[in-house]
Image (cartoon, grey):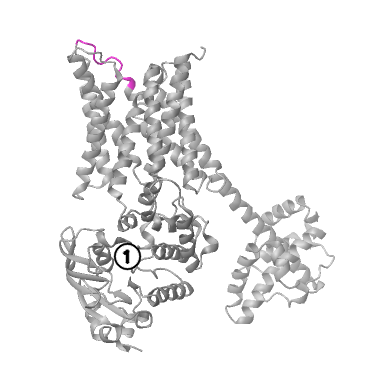
Amino acid sequence: MTAPAPLAITHLTVAYGDKTVLWDITWQATPGLTAIVGPNGAGKSTLLRAALGLIPSIAGDARFFGRKLEEVRNRVGYLPQRASVDWDFPASALDVVCMSRYPRMRWWGRVPKAERDAALGALEQVGLADLADRQIGRLSGGQQQRVFLARALAQDADLYLMDEPFAAVDAATEQAIIAVLRRVVAAGRSVIAVHHDLATVPAYFDHVLLLNGRAVAAGHVKAAFTPDAIARAYGGRLNVLEQAVAEGGLR
Amino acid sequence: MSLGYNTLVVLLGCALLGLACGTVGAFALLRGRALMADAVGHAALPGVVLAAMIVATLGGNPRALPPLLAGALVAGVLGVLAVQALTRGRRIREDAAIAIVLSSFYALGVALLSYVQTMPQAAQAGLGKFILGQAAAMRAEDALWAGGIAAFSVLICLVLFQRLRAACFDPDYARVMGLSVARTDLMLLALIVIVAVAGLQAVGLVLVVALLILPAATARLLTHRLPVLLLVSAFLGALAGALGAAASAFEPEWPTGAAVVLAGAIFFTLALLLAPERGVLPEAWRRTRRRIAATESHFLRAAWEAQEAAGAGPGTAGDRWTPIAALAAARGWSEGHASRLALWLGLRGLLARADGEIHLTPRGAAAARRAVRAHRAVELHLLGLGATDIAGADRLADLVEHGLPAEMATRLLAEPSSLPASPHALGPRS
């Protein structure tokens, strides 16, 4: 018997008030590096957040490694959107990364040395070891994004759900982040990332889920990331650049 | 008056209350629950009045504190529940819900209070002190209660420190990791209600919110470290509480709440103005100093380049006097502005002035050389790369010129004498 999929979503339907954002999504993630792609308002972040139980769903179910999230929390890591927190918060980069180790600690007292070292190791992986004690508000946007990445890595999970890990970072940071993600996947773990740049999907990712309120196409990038599928996901809303990518297909 | 035993105990009780409010308030502020404390305070009034009425009707002593505080606690919790019920369906935003609950409960309390005053048993006696606070009316055992509650709240905050921090910084992430943010939030709300109610007698329900928020907001201006923030906030809360109680001891008719909050407000204002990193004045001072430094080096560079233009040769400070008017024209400054700058630089010993002309002193020449060196090396480098046009290179070079520390410029950049002349003509900038 094959191992259960890292994430399997069945008939997931989510609405904000009267507006239905996700319609009956059924999708099985394949181990490896997967992109969730779609136009603005397609429900990409909503899909991750609903799967993680952060927002209620009307119907449907998400299973991680064949189990409920509650049973396998320590195997699931999360990287939220950078804009979702107040970066003026009184905390250092190391403080933020240490938060990922809280479930392993007693919930009183100081952060034990072993957990601090694990957090420092994660910062090292993303190249921020020197800035561990820097207040997070004084980091650049790309560095803040890498702090979030380090925090996710420090969870030592088998599946990482990442909401726009490349949002508003420069080209060098983007390369650094993708290198980290490739190492993670090479170690036998899986990453599912919301991604915005259609042009880099084939270069960065193995698998793709094209989303537009519904699951438009899913599978290996070579099979699923076709001009036809992209056009269907984006409807008439493809801008000139994206159109060129879609028509150019896979290079 | 001398500090009797009772006064001393009250002082200590108020300080402990302030300490607890400062600690809980820090988390309330970081979690965005500042206004909730206000709702709790105002919502407590009908509870206090109803409790007094019930006690009086049953023939008890309506001045006894425990039933009044119990009434306040129940009403405060009801207020919190009302806010949560209103916001649940997302029909009303939290700020509006808080305003509605706060004013409605308070209005009910005021109405009940005026009804109580018509009752024969004098049930209203002393209820007014709950509105604006009167520490002088506290007895030693009240103060002991306050101290006990304060110690309990601080202990809970310390035990829950990591949970509270995670919930305040990134609640969604904490949820994904399986930390119960709802439970942590509930605990924080409970703490807010407890310290707000405990502070009612000393500070009064109208102003108790300030004792929670002012010390925390002040501490936030002073530090980036959460443990330090908690310490500073607790200390400032205690200090404000003690000052308020002291004021009340010297002048018993004074509303203690006002004294406490004024002390807190003074601390906050001082921090807002003077905090080394985030204060208004240090920031303005840093900005002004940067601007002055930039203007100074513009002037010195213009003086240097005027020497070059006069034929002293690039990079050598010829021994000439330059008219201020020429420099003003070169930089596009008014002559008055240039004269004031020359006066200032003269006072700093960087140049000598006579008859509307200036002359760089050795120190001035050295400073001018540094400015020219930084500016021109970058400018020529950029032009050499073909990266930008002359105006763009000039602007970018300005950024480097004023951003590079002097010793680094000396180490990195070539001597002006080894560089070709400035690529752009001296003249007003476009």
- Assign the C terminus of chain B to one quadrant of the image: bottom right
Q: Which residue is mark 1?
A: A75
Measured along the vertical axis of the image, is residue A220 above or below residue B46?
A: below
The residue closer to the viewer here, B393 or A233, is A233
The amino acid pointed to by label 1 is Arg
The residue closer to the viewer here, A199 or A12, is A12
Q: Quadrant of residue B410?
A: bottom right
The residue closer to the viewer here, A2 or A148, is A2
Q: Is residue A136 visible?
A: no
- The residue drawn where x is 61% and y is 73% is B393
- The residue drawn where x is 66% and y is 75% is B424
- Image x and y of residue A45, in percent: 28, 66
- The residue drawn where x is 45% and y is 48% is A110
Question: For residue B127: magenta?
Answer: yes
- Image x and y of residue B350, in percent: 77, 56
Q: Residue furthest front?
A: A1
The residue closer to the viewer here, B265 or B332, is B265
Q: Is residue B33 left or right of residue B58?
A: right
Measured along the vertical axis of the image, is residue A178 above or below residue B79?
A: below
Q: Residue furthest right?
A: B319
**Where does the magenta region start and end?**
B120-129
Measured along the vertical axis of the image, is residue B144 above or below residue A139?
A: above
Question: For residue B117: magenta?
Answer: no
Measured along the vertical axis of the image, is residue B33 above or below residue B302?
A: above
Predominant SS along the magenta part: loop
Q: Is residue B411 left or right of residue B237?
A: right
Q: Secondary structure at mark 1?
A: helix
Q: Is residue B417 visible?
A: yes
